[in-house]
Amino acid sequence: MNSRDFYAKSPFTITEAETQISTKLSKTEIKEELQQISKKLSAIQDAMYAHNKYAVLVCLQGMDTSGKDSLIREVFSSFNPRGVVVHSFKTPSELELEHDYLWRHYIALPERGKFAVFNRSHYENVLVTRVNPSYILNENLPSITSESDISQEFWENRFSQINNFENHIHQNGTLVFKFFLNLSKEEQRKRLLRRLEKESHNWKFSPGDLVERKRWDDYMNCYEEAINKTHTKEAPWYVIPADDKNMARLLVAKILYQEMLKLTDIKEPPLNDDIKKDIDMYKDLLAKKEI
């Protein structure tokens, strides 16, 4: 597998993107391979922490039930808890609405040496708000007093702002990976039904899921344009077939691993020369229990 196989093609057409990928691997084999790659990614993160030059931002976008939560749990299962932070962006709070729409994402960016996962991300600001433009009014923008003020130019500006945001953090050492979990409408129907039929999953269901499902085509159009307008060399989009959750998790992990291996400068710093010349003495002191 080559990670570039899942690059969003230019121009990206969502109806031509696969939601299912064929494989000869069994479910057990997929899970075993994922576990191995998760451990390798964890080792890279450990070295990255010591190297202290890079951070990694993983953005996950997809329709309801596309598997974002479980993907995060499985892909990062081997990580030291200090090495990865997950942020789930819900409806903006009152405090967040007192700032520009990117503020809450800026303050959630990872420290050098760490991974951050955005479960839904700054792209909600050109997806959910575009399908439901009344939400923009909550931002209290000086030039927007009604939905009729929200023009195509407004969205074009947001795409540019997002590109500038991602380019800025990339130039300052944050690697940006954006994954669109491409779920079919039929598979979403099955997963929503499963939430209702399985009592332990009832809590995941909300009637609002069905309201948003009715806007499926609107969301697909918005995803298509957002991906086309923000797929850059510095922050590329990867389109992941998501009808098979296990395979989607493996693909995301493999892409992260392949791309991180390209950073050959990530290494633990060498031992200080003064410590190095006395290392045998320190070993001897500890071995003899003199300290």
Image: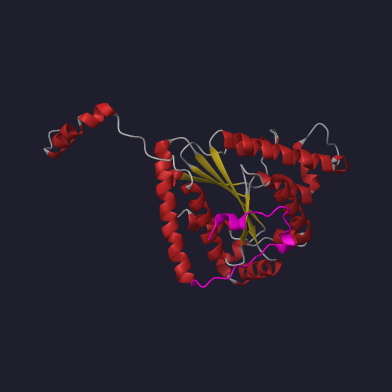
**Residue 278 location, x and y as percent?**
20, 30
Residue occupying image coordinates x 70% and y 34% = 100
Q: Position of residue 164 (x, y in %)?
A: 67, 36
Residue at 73% x, 41% y: name it: 159
In-front residue for pair 167/248: 167
Residue 203 appearing in the image: yes
For the question of whether residue 94 can be seen, the reply is: no
Q: Residue at x 37, y 39 (%)?
A: 268
Colour scheme employed for the rendering of this structure: secondary structure
Q: Is residue 99 left or right of residue 74?
A: right
Decide whether the magenta segment is chiefly helix, strand or loop.
loop
- Frontmost residue, 196 versus 275: 275
Residue 43 magenta-drawn?
no
Q: Is residue 9 toward the left or the right of residue 169 in the image? A: right
Task: State which quarter of the image contains the C terminus.
Answer: top left
Residue 160 percent across, percent down from the top left? 73, 38
Please identify the quarter of the rendering in which residue 189 is found: bottom right
- Look at 50% across and 39% down and name the residue there: 55
Quick one: which residue is furthest to the right in this view? 148
Please check the rendered image and state whether residue 18 is part of the magenta-colored stretch, yes or no.
Answer: yes
The picture places residue 245, in percent across and down from the top left corner, at 56, 64
* Image vertical order of residue 178 relative to residue 245, above or below: above
| Residue at the limit of the structure toward the top, as seen here | 274
Q: Is residue 56 above or below residue 187?
A: above
Number of disc labels: 0
Front residue of 86 and 12: 12
Magenta part of the protein: which range?
1-26
When the figure is inspected, residue 115 is found, relative to residue 141, above or below; the finding is: below
